[in-house]
Amino acid sequence: MSNPTYTVIFYLFAAITVCSAAFVVFTRNVIYSAFSLLFTFFGVAALYVFLSADFIAVTQVVVYVGGILVLLLFGVMFTNSIMQGKKSEVIHIIPGTLLLAVMIGAMLYTFYTTHGWMPSETTLQGSIVERIGFETMSRYVLPFEMVSILLLAALIGAAFLARFDKSSK
């Protein structure tokens, strides 16, 4: 049976996540949008904690809030021209509406085929973080290192593209 407290907590965090994500999409101010993205990321992390996915929740906070959002905020604050951008066109609404329809369809399909939203009653034994670390450093060490080399190449490419070119003046 589902506990009413868990249901209230789930809907509270889901409402925070959805409302802040909607504010990210619909606001015209980029700074407000970026700060609202902070609440969206924390809401998703809270939903991961609610689903007993502690490692993914911590990864969500460290990677997205600690890395990507801070990088986005610095990029927005250091760029003056982004604040004077053009208003969005109607053509951008069509793909967003289609994506929203697909997501709502997936949620309704999940609800009607599983007859509920609550996770299963089975619990995992032991530490999932220990298991992920063991698998990453034993079975999946080659893909792990390949991804790190790919990210390093992307970082070098981004630094090369963003460098200040003195010959253009």
Image (cartoon, grey):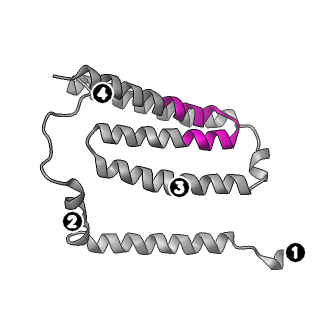
Q: Residue furthest bottom?
A: 167
> Which residue is disc 2 drawn over?
135
Distance CA(mark 4)–CA(mark 2):
33 Å
Judge whether residue 47 is colored magenta: no
| Residue for badge 3 | 68
Element class at badge 2: helix
Residue named by callout 4: 109
Chain-order first, disc 2 or disc 1: 2
Asked if the residue at tag 3 contacts the one at tag 2, i.e. Cβ–Cβ closer than 8 Å, the answer is no
Mark found first going from the N terminus, 1 or 3: 3
Dot 2 amino acid type: Glu
Q: The disc labelled 1 sits on which kind of residue? A: Lys
Q: Quadrant of residue 2?
A: top left
The amino acid type found where label 3 is placed reads Ile
Residue neighbourhood size for the residue with mark 1, other residues' Cα within 10 Å, grouped as few (<14), some (14–19), many (≥20): few
CA gap between label 1 and label 3 equals: 32 Å
Badge nearest the viewer, 3 or 4:
3
Q: Residue furthest front?
A: 5
Q: Are marks 1 and 3 in contact (CB under 8 Å)?
A: no
Tell me where residue 151 appears, x and y as whole percent.
47, 69
Q: Is residue 30 magenta?
A: yes
Q: Is residue 66 above or below residue 2?
A: below
| Quadrant housing residue 93 | top right
Return the disc, 4 or 2, that comes first in the chain's sequence. Answer: 4
Of residues 165 and 79, the one nearer the viewer is: 79
* Disc 2/disc 3 C-alpha distance (Å): 26 Å
Residue extent of the magenta highlight: 18-37
Mark drawn on residue 169: 1
- Look at discs 1 and 3 and give the one toward the viewer: 3
